[in-house]
Image: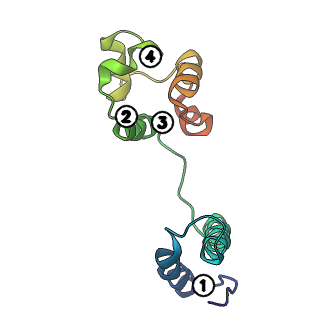
Amino acid sequence: MTIKPIRSDEDLRRAFRHLEKVFQAGEGTPQADERDVLVTLIEAYENKHCDFGPVDPVEAIKFRMEQEGLVPRDLEPYIGQSGRVSEVLNRKRPLSLRMVKKLHDGLKIPYESLMAGVR
């Protein structure tokens, strides 16, 4: 495939269709190079044309929990006792800076994903 700039939503759809074909390419292959270039072009287009809005910190935490197979009790070292974990997950208590730092350090959740709810 000849790689071209992404200038429209149709170009974006075409790029995604091709990305699906080369996504699993082995490192060091021409298809892997193609994949890397396509990902960069797609990200650039989306950053310029798509407003995804701010990340919800609770959703970021829940996403990491799902990824890692964690349950609320596993968050106690980062957030505090089970009642506090429940309050955070139910959006009744905002994250503190201390919680953000612990979640970032312990679960590798990006600061940007956690900072929207900090007071």
Which amino acid does the dot numbered 1 rest on? Ser
Q: In the rendered image of this protein, does residue 87 appear above or below residue 47?
A: above
Question: Which residue: 53% across, 58% down?
Answer: 52
Residue 57 — which label? Answer: 3
Q: Quadrant of residue 98?
A: top right
Q: Earlier in the sequence, mark 2 or mark 1?
A: 1
Residue 65 — which label? Answer: 2
| CA gap, disc 2 and disc 4 | 13 Å
Q: Quadrant of residue 49?
A: bottom right
Please tell me whether mark 2 or mark 1 is closer to you in this view. 2
Residue 106: x %, y % from top left: 53, 23
Helix, strand or loop at mark 4 = helix
State the scheme by which the image is colored.
rainbow
Q: Which quarter of the rendered picture does the C terminus lie within?
A: top right
Q: Residues within 10 Å of mark 2 (few under 14, many from 20)?
A: some
Residue 93: x %, y % from top left: 41, 21
| CA gap, disc 2 and disc 1 | 35 Å
Question: Which residue: 46% across, 24% down?
Answer: 94
Q: Earlier in the sequence, mark 2 or mark 4?
A: 2
